[in-house]
Each structure stands twice: as C-alpha cells, then as structure tokens.
Amino acid sequence: MKVSSFLRVLAVFGLALSPGLGLAEWNLNFKPTNTILGHDIEMLHNWIMWIILGISIVVFGAMFYSILKHRKALGHKASHFHENTTVEIIWTIVPVVILIGMAIPATKVLLAARDTSAPDITIKATGYQWKWGYDYLDEGVKFYSSLSTPRDQINGLAEKGETYLLEVDRPVVVPVGKKVRILTTANDVIHSWFVPGLSVKQDAIPGFIRDTWFKAEETGTFRGQCTELCGKEHGFMPIVVEVVTEEEYKTWVAAQLAESGAPSFDANKTYTVAELVSAGEQVYNTNCVACHQPGGVGMPPTFPAIKGGKIATGPIGDHIDIILNGSKKNPMMAAWGSQLTDMDIAAVITYQRSGINDLGEAIQPGDVATARGI
C-alpha cells in the first residue's frame, strides 16, 4: 500500500472515531422547548431513561458478576433447579411494579398531548408539495407559506445563512399563552407538521383531518420542518411559528385581513344577502366545487346537485346540520364544522340557497353558532 493511500485510510478512521468534528451541534437531550407539555414530555423521557439505566445495571451487573465469579475456571459447577416459587413471584411482581411506574406518568402525558378541547385559536395546516397552507378558522386569515432561502445558497453559490432551509416568506403567527389547535391534512401525499421547540408533531394525511395543540409560554421564533419523505423537495418545506403578544397578534390579523380584502367577522352585525353570497362563493369555490361542480349541478348519485336539491331548498336547520355534521346516509359528505368558521358556513349556505338557488334567504353567523350549541 502506498503511503498516500495509507494516510487516507487513517484519515477516514480518524473521522469515524471523532464524530464531533463533523457535527455543528450535539446535544444529549431534547431541544429546549417553550411549552409546559414539552417539559412534561422531557421529564417523562428522563424518568424512563433512569428506569432503563437501573434495569441495565442490575441485569448486566448480575450477569457479569456471575460470569466472572462463578465461572468454570474457578471450579464452580452449574446448579440445576426449576419451579422455584419465590423466584417466579419476584420476577413477576418486580416487572409489574416497573411497568406501573412507567405507565402512570406516560398515560398522563399522552392524555394531555391529545386533549385538543377548548382551544383559543384553531389553524388548519394543509401540506402541499412543497409548501404549507394555513387557514385561521376563527379569524378568516388564509395564506401559503413557502421556503424563502435564496436559491444561490441552496446551489452553493452564496454563503449559507444562519437559518438556512428553516426560513419562510410568511410565518405562522400566534399569541403567547393561548392554546392553539392545529388541524392537519394534505393535498397530495403524506406530510408531517413538526416544530420541536413547541413540542408539537402531527402527520398530515390526504383525505383526513388530524389535530394536535400547543401553548407557547414565551414569545419568540420557532422553526421546524416536514418530517415525512414527501418527494424530491422534502428538505425544502420548513415551518416557522412566531409567538407574539396578544396586541401584536391582533394587529397582525387586522393587517392580514386588510391585505386580503376579506371581511372580518362581527358577531353583532347582520349581513345582507349580497354580502353573504359574495363571501360564500369564495368558500364554495375553495371547498365544495370539486364535488358539487360549478353552478351546483353535482355529480349524481354520489354528489347530489345543490341547484334545486332538497337540502339547499329545504329547511334551513337541515342545511346547517349537514354542513356542520356531515351526512349519515352519504359518507362522501364530510363534516365541515371543525374546518370552517361560523362566518364561512353562514356564507356558503347563503350562497347555495340564494346564489345557486334563488330563495333570497340570508343565514347569519349567529344562526350557525346557535346550531353548534355555542
């Protein structure tokens, strides 16, 4: 072997034995979190690790002690015994106690992690190849969030920034100290919404709505990524969440609504038929047109026509109910109550009854709230 080849081999082994030289950051524990639930998860992790360490010490300690002190070379002979009641009781009770010690805290954390009830804000996060779409269901704010890292950095033509591949053009903005429910779904393939600093992760699956939640304890910027292998641009699908004060959040919402031209929801206002039909047409074209077709002609029998249909021309209560809760007779009609706001539902129903059908009726957001039982 030539000297140069020998040196290359040594260099490879040197790097293999010194992995820290090739790592920008190396931590023994989880990434620091900004939520109480995240601290609970970390405490559970540490508790389980201590239990595992204790078991390992006892088991391997006994094993190596037996090998060293009772080996044949020292003149020991193997004992032959079976059906020892005391031993069987001990090795049954001890594992049960250990499992209970792990199961109780694990169950508490799991139940807390799945409790998405009573949120202050609900955001639907939709995965696309390769960006995220966000709908603030209570505020009426909608936008897409895409990678903003310059292509020159990606192609190696410019120096990489501090937040390389973890920066977006439009971040998610939420207020500090508020419970935020995230509804995840996808438009094409499976994605995953993951922000480690907020201890939140949920897969986004086409055709399904799944949910998770977080409540940030401090303001700041938190970054994550899609963690499903969703295609060739998988590594270019970051998530950025900006946690701000409540006043800053209200100012941001107002600015977003002003930019989009979308009307803000006023619970005390009575909207006209024209206002609701105009807003409802947008909701219909975004969520309903694929199945019920432009003009509400439908694709019978799977997707019945809205124009002249018995639901859209029948009792208003039945119309609100099927939008909120879906149809038991036709499983293709999903429940939209968790995906659309009261304003969206009132508007789209008004559009179906007074835009597609000429009934001249206006359904107010308050009517939808009453049907929800709020």
Image (tube, grey):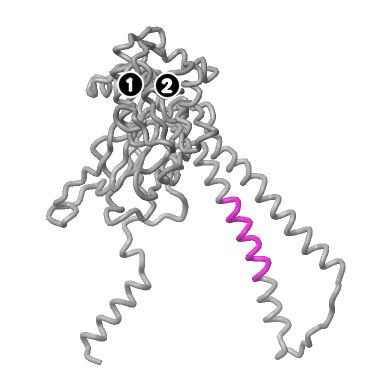
Tag 1 residue: 356
Q: Is residue 232 magenta?
A: no
Rendered view: 18 above or below 362: below
Residue located at (62% from left, 41% from top): 108
* Image spot of residue 182 (x, y percent): 43, 35
Query: Of the numbered discs in the image, which one, if any, rests on residue 327?
Result: none
Name the residue nearer the viewer: 301 or 69: 301
- Please state which of residues 152 and 300 is positioned toward the viewer in this rendering: 300
Judged from the image, the secondary structure of the residue bearing numbered disc 1 is helix
Which portion, as a residue range, is magenta? Answer: 46-60
Q: Which residue type carries mark 2?
A: Ala
Q: Dot 2 corresponds to which residue? A: 312
Q: Amino acid at mark 1?
A: Ile
CA gap between label 1 and label 2 equals: 9 Å
> Which residue: 86% across, 71% down?
84
- Image location of residue 97, percent across then percent down: 74, 54
Q: Are marks 1 and 2 in contact (CB under 8 Å)?
A: yes
Q: Quadrant of the N terminus?
A: bottom left
For residue 184, above or below residue 158: above
Label located before the other in sequence (1 or 2): 2
Decide if residue 290 is on the left or right side of residue 74: left
For label 2, the SS is loop
- Image quadrant in which you'd find residue 134: top left
Whether residue 5 sits left or right of residue 240 in the image: it is left
The residue at 28%/77% (across/down) is 11
Kindly give the residue lying farthest to the left in the view shown. Answer: 157
Residue situated in front as seen by the camera: 195 or 119: 119
